[in-house]
Amino acid sequence: MASASESERKEPVNEQMVANMYGALRSELNQIYSKITELEMEASEHSLVISAIEPLDPSRRCYRMIGGVLVERTIKEVLPAVQRNKEGIEEVISRLNEALEKKKKEIADLEAKYKIKIRKPDGEAKEEDSGRKEGAAQGVLVGPAGEN
């Protein structure tokens, strides 16, 4: 299945196939944005937990949710696990950012190759609104990821 989509991406037969391919790429790009946002929220939550339990006594009892089950542990046992999880999440975020850049380049190449322009259907008022929404969404999703 992957080889079929790769061959479609190389040489589409007609305009409809180009449009479908472009739409699929945009959809994949949006999925990557969503996943990055979700993981950034998780990393932020992990940071809050770490900052809350670090100053406490390591022998103090704490509770951790593992696979939907609440287990009792000590801070000494939980803190390293939460830190490892946060590092893993940050690693995944960086890989997703790399994939995001590759996908953006792929979309830009496709736009240049087939001279794709996005049309706004109902005049300039909608263009301004959607431009504002798109810019705000991109700022939230992309901006913080590079700085962390």
Image: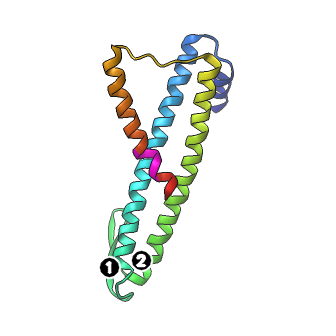
x and y, in percent, of residue 145 in the image:
48, 52
* Residue 53 sits in quarter: bottom left
Horizontally, residue 92 falls left or right of residue 65, namely right
Q: Residue at x 35, y 32 (%)?
A: 132
x and y, in percent, of residue 19 in the image:
53, 17
* Predominant SS along the magenta part: helix
Disc 2: which residue: 78
Q: Residue at x 40, y 67 (%)?
A: 47
Asked if disc 2 and disc 1 are in contact, CB closer than 8 Å, the reply is: yes
Few, some or many C-alpha atoms within 10 Å of disc 1 (few <14, some 14-19, many ≥20)?
A: some
Q: Nearer the viewer, residue 77 or 125?
A: 125
Secondary structure at numbered mark 1: strand
Asked if residue 65 can be seen in this view, the reply is no
Secondary structure at numbered mark 2: helix
Q: Which residue is drawn at 59% across and 16% down?
A: 115
Q: Which of 125 and 74 is in front in this view?
A: 125
Asked if residue 87 can be seen in this view, the reply is yes
x and y, in percent, of residue 31 in the image:
46, 39
* Residue 10 sits in quarter: top right
Q: Distance between the residues labelled 2 and 1?
A: 8 Å
Quarter of the image that includes the N terminus: top right
Whether residue 58 is situated above or below residue 83 in the rendered picture:
below
Query: Type of residue at label 1?
Result: Cys
Check residue 35 in the rendering and tell me which mark sits there, or answer none: none
Q: Residue at x 59, y 28 (%)?
A: 108
Disc 1: which residue: 62
Instruction: Write down the region rendered in magenta.
Output: 140-144
Whether residue 13 is situated above or below residue 100 in the rendered picture:
above
x and y, in percent, of residue 96 in the image:
54, 48
* Residue 21 sits in quarter: top right
Query: Type of residue at label 2?
Result: Val
Few, some or many C-alpha atoms within 10 Å of disc 2 (few <14, some 14-19, many ≥20)?
A: some
